[in-house]
Image (cartoon, helix red, strand yellow):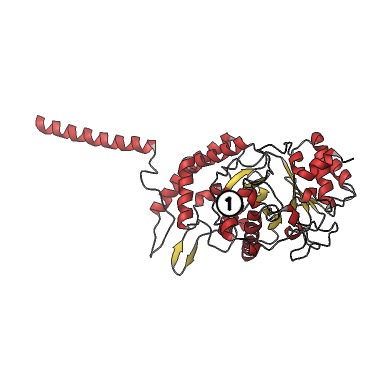
Amino acid sequence: MSNPLLASIREDPLLLLSGHHPSSSSSPIAVSDTDSYLLDPSQIGSASGSFQNDGGGFLGGGYDAALISESEYGFTRPDFRQAPLVGTVEPYERHVFLCYKNPQVWPPRIEAAEFDRLPRLLAAALSAKKPNMKRQTRLTICEGRDGTETSNGDVLIFPDMIRYRRLTHFDVETFVEEVLVKDGEWLPGSPESLRGWYIFVCCHGTRDRRCGVCGPSIISKFKNEIENRCLQGKVSVSPCSHIGGHKYAGNVIIFGPNSNKEVIGHWYGYVMPEDVPVLLDQHIGKGEVVDFLWRGQMGLSEEEQKQSQELRYLVNGGTHTDRIAKDSTQENKGIVTVSTCGASQLDGTGCCQTNGGDSSCCQNPVLQEKSGPDQDSEEAVLNFAAEKKKRSKKQVLRNNGAKRSGPSKVCSMPTWYESWEREDTYAALAVIGAAVTVAFTYKFYKQMS
């Protein structure tokens, strides 16, 4: 007799982890809006149960992405950047990544694949223990390559920022009970601390063609930029399985510390390769959310995600509608406001540089502070806004009083009416009033004489 629990898990184990019925439209792993995007499962084979089937090529569930139309499934597809992003992340508090093989051999639902025992058993154990867990937990598969920092069987846990090595299907029950239920340690292995930033890009092409087409090019761009900026060991990028939201491909999750040193998982959607430098410069380098690509974050409800973005818009100036219009204009013109210097903001180096005698400034010095929009309380954000306003005024006065020689191109400065304060108005009125009084007194004196 078949076990109904295992049968439901084979249908979609992550639905059970999130506590949603498969029919729920709000499920984080609901299938694509258009079924035609999904590959036919009957055409997909499962990888071998061993870890050895992780080489290149198109084994098992793999397919040749080059044969799939870029215009239909890539960054120029009709539905690209047509839906709102913010508030599309289901609320959860902990993210577990199992390093296991690679996207070329992942079947459409690897957590339920009969011959992939480790992910299947881990998903089943998490589902069974869900009522006993203190934190709502999400499971995702990421690439595992033996001999690397993410070998097969390794488990990465966020926001805890820890890694356990070489989990096997024999240890699953004990691991889940000790680590994820009791929040303790798995005695056979000691947890290793993770440092730096971890980026995951959905490349699960057998689950949805859009992710299979968009994901690999984003991964490639991240790796090139990381190498060019000498960020190896500080920033890590890895392909991962389906995370929810096929239509938002390319989907990216970035885990790293905020201004309070708390690890947050931010989700981005509709990411293109040309957006990668923006994410590295603004999100990782400055600690600022890239709002026009932002879907939400771990630890917030959908409504809280929307409120968080709106608060950032108010702090940074302008309304939500104004910022969306600005982002759209920059996108259409191909304008990307990023750092052009080779040095990384992770090293605390400046960004302004001189090229051929023409000095350019790629960022506002006031925005280099990592405090502010990422603070957890509204009071802290409002305090940041007040402080930012004071610094902006002082910066304007310093720049207006500084002597410059030779042609130069500087950061855009606020006009006089943008930096005009209420006390400035009072002072101007006082001066005008004094002048009128003097003129009236002088005229009266002349008449008396």
Image quadrant in which the C terminus is located = top left
Instruction: Give the amino acid type for the residue marked by disc 1 in the picture.
Output: Tyr
SS for callout 1: loop
Q: Is residue 349 visible?
A: no
Residue on which disc 1 sits: 270
With 78 as the anchor, is 129 left or right in this view?
right
Taking depth in this image into account, of 41 and 363 the one nearest to the observer is: 41
Q: Residues within 10 Å of mark 1 (few under 14, many from 20)?
A: many
Q: Residue at x 58, y 56 (%)?
A: 72
Residue lying furthest bottom? 356
Q: Is residue 6 visible?
A: yes
Residue 129 point in image, percent of width and height = 83, 38
With 449 as the anchor, is 161 left or right in this view?
right
Q: How many marks?
A: 1
Image quadrant in which the N terminus is located = top right
Residue 7 point in image, percent of width and height = 82, 42
Residue 277 point in image, percent of width and height = 57, 58
Residue 357 point in image, percent of width and height = 44, 68
Q: Residue at x 88, y 44 (%)?
A: 173
Taking depth in this image into account, of 310 and 374 the one nearest to the observer is: 310
Taking depth in this image into account, of 264 and 109 the one nearest to the observer is: 109
Vertical comparison of 243 with 304: above or below: below
With 265 as the anchor, is 177 left or right in this view?
right
